[in-house]
Amino acid sequence: MRLSKQIEKLAIRLTTIMLPLLTIACQLNAEETPDTMNVAILGDSNTWLGGDNCNQPKGWNTWFVKNFNPQSCQSYARSGATWTNTTSTFLNTEENVGVLTDNNVIYNQVMRLHQAVSDGLQPEPHLIIIAAGTNDAWFEAKRPAAFSTEGNLFDASPSDICAMLPNRVLTLQSAVIHNCRLLQSHYPNARIVLLTPLQTTAVSLAKIQQTGDLIEDCGKHLGLCVIRQDRDCVVNREQETRKRTNTYDGTHTNENGAKQNGKIIADKIKQLINKTNCSL
């Protein structure tokens, strides 16, 4: 009887402690709306078109900002960037060349974001969007290991993954896992959303779909949300082959394509706010 009383008192004490914490958690969840969120975007040329401040009309991120209305939004994207590294890739947060190089990779954008946050130039992000993969498919000859599924890091521990140097991360899947684990270690409370590449006339639809599938598999493994731009956004390879409609060259969006894509992505990410899963 005495033991039952002690257990009952302990339960009451725990409830007294936990209720305020649960209330705070619910309030935080309820207050997580776009206008309270700081957003950081990483990516390649279709994001770079919007400019670092997300205010140029040919970039989807400009129209994303107009529709999502975040507290802040900064782009770290670079034209020519790939997910995949090479054996010559090293830490370089300064390079900005606009073409494919060993160091024009998402890894260095992750590091540049982290440096900006550490220096107080960028608020810690609540939402991180990564839109890349087109150049991995387009310039496969320059990234020969990109589409290998060996050594995908699915079974490696997060700490071991984060300790890896970029020149050891040579496949698309391992690069996605590596970069996302780094971001999770720096910003454990941030949501990370992966955007697969748009359709393009530069490579076959099958190759873009393969790229998207590999990225999506990584997202599922990491519990991240993935938006399939090749399925959900407005750039259509067959249409662009016949007549430029939503791109100006078959790959890069014009203002019309960017505007539509930005709204689609904003609407999809809005659906994720206050959800515990990645169902879109």
Image: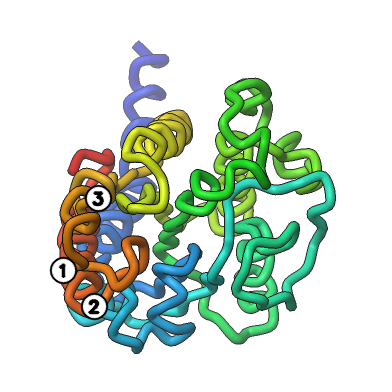
Q: In the depicted view, which residue is nearer to us: 246 or 128?
A: 246
Mark 3 touches mark 2? (CB < 8 Å): no
Look at mark 1 in the image and give the residue it sits on.
Answer: 260
Please indicate whether residue 63 sits to the left or right of residue 133 in the image.
left
Q: At 21% from the left edge and 82% from the top edge, which residue is drawn?
A: 66
SS for dot 2: helix
Kind of residue indicated by mark 3:
Arg
Q: Which residue is mark 3?
A: 237
Q: Amino acid at mark 1?
A: Gln
Residue 220: numbered disc:
none
Would you identify the image quadrant in which residue 163 lies?
top right
Does the rendering let one see residue 28? yes
| 139 or 2, nearer to the observer | 139
Disc 2 crowd rating (10 Å Cα; few below 14, some 14-19, many 20+) is: many
* Residue 45 located left or right of residue 121: left
| Marked residue nearer the N-terminal end (3 or 1) | 3
Query: Disc 3 vs disc 1: which is toward the camera?
Result: 3
Q: Quadrant of residue 239?
A: bottom left
Provide the residue designation for mark 2.
63
